[in-house]
Image (tube, rainbow, N blue to C red):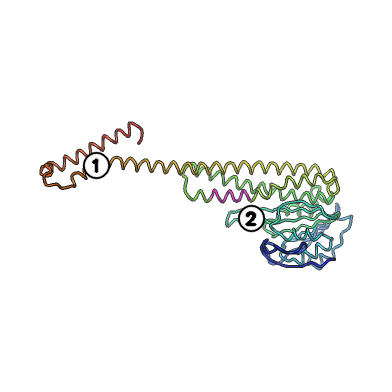
Amino acid sequence: MKARRLIKPKRTSDKAGMPPESLVFVGEQKIEKPVITVFQYNAEHSDDREYTLEEALNVQTTPDKITWFNIEGLHDVELVHKLCDKFSVPALLIEDILNTSERPKVDIIGDVLFIVLRMLWKDEKSESIITEHMSIVLGKDFILAFQEGILGDVFQPIRTRLRTGRGKLRKQKIDYLCYELMDAIVDSYFGILETLGDKIEVLEEDVLVQPQTELLRQLHDLRSDLLNVRRSVWPLRDIINNIQRDDDTYFQKSTGFYLRDLYDHTVQELETIETYWELLSGLQDIYLSSISNRMNEIMKVLTIITTIFIPLSFIAGVYGMNFKYMPELDSRYGYPIVILVMLIISFIMIRIFIKKKWM
């Protein structure tokens, strides 16, 4: 096997200029130590447990059993490298496994089908949507599933069905297991979209009732989360289409029906995302219009007040000049008369504003 360089930078830019087949982990370490779980099963029996790297490398795959390697944690480049070498996974695919910023896609190189997906989960502390890198390598009698971490794991129902034998999973071929893994990820998007939908509904009421500056930040956060989901879901249509055009090399015709259902789910999610995106754009417009109207109302009140005080200021200015021969200055009733005139002018102006519906 050709020697490969094993390097561990954190950012995609650190990889610039390196030759192809340089195995580089791009991302953040999500867990302290990688966990390898191996499932081996057929219709009659299922066995699973955690393995060390040495034990996992000694696991033998046989045509009468399906073997599923699930690896949680990608920061150990040597571990990923050795597991992939065991199944002759091309180096270019290993690069994509280690690159957590890789876009969702599907590739067929050599004897394996390679799929990159995104797992989504909600961070309860920040209430934001977090994405995790997920890679699936499908061979003739094995599956390698590489997860960036463990928080976004949605495969627990699949593990339960394998252990208990419920459903048809243990009776199907390995392509059906690959479909199940993809379906679990795609179905988890519905929960994320429901959460975003609830937030948009609450935000819509707040924007209509009492727009505040804080709402603009919430709108921005929701748009960012929705864009994050959109980037994860949008490529899935092309992925499923490419898999369906595979001429039954990796997926049987019986599994093709399930893939079409999976395609329908992605289309439904994309339609929901587009609807939410339009709602958020509309809410942002409503917010800006409300703020503008509110500012106009404030300026209107200030303008009315200023207009009322213009003639009063003129009168006060005239009698504030203090010329020696101003007759009103010596009048005993000059001050109350001026005040009365000011009040009458103010009253007349207010009546005019009300009649014209400016107030």
Q: Residue at position x 21%, y 42% from top? A: 315
Please check the rendered image and state whether residue 212 is part of the magenta-colored stretch, yes or no.
Answer: no
Element marked by disc 2 = strand
Q: Earlier in the sequence, mark 1 or mark 2?
A: 2
Element marked by disc 1 = helix
Q: Residue at position x 59%, y 54% from top? A: 128
| Image side of residue 111 versus residue 315, left or right | right
Q: Name which quarter of the figure residue 267 lies in.
A: top right
Q: Residue at position x 22%, y 36% from top? A: 344
Find disc 2 in the rendering and name its residue: 130
Magenta span: chief secondary structure:
helix
Q: Residues within 10 Å of mark 1 (few under 14, many from 20)?
A: some
The kind of residue tagged 1 is Leu
Q: Quadrant of the N terminus?
A: bottom right
Q: Quadrant of the C terminus?
A: top left
- Give the number of the disc on residue 312: 1
The kind of residue tagged 2 is Ile
The location of residue 91, given as percent across then percent down, is: 80, 61
Q: Residue furthest top?
A: 355
Q: Which residues are magenta?
A: 218-227
The location of residue 113, given as percent across then percent down, is: 81, 53
The location of residue 248, given as percent across then percent down, is: 85, 46
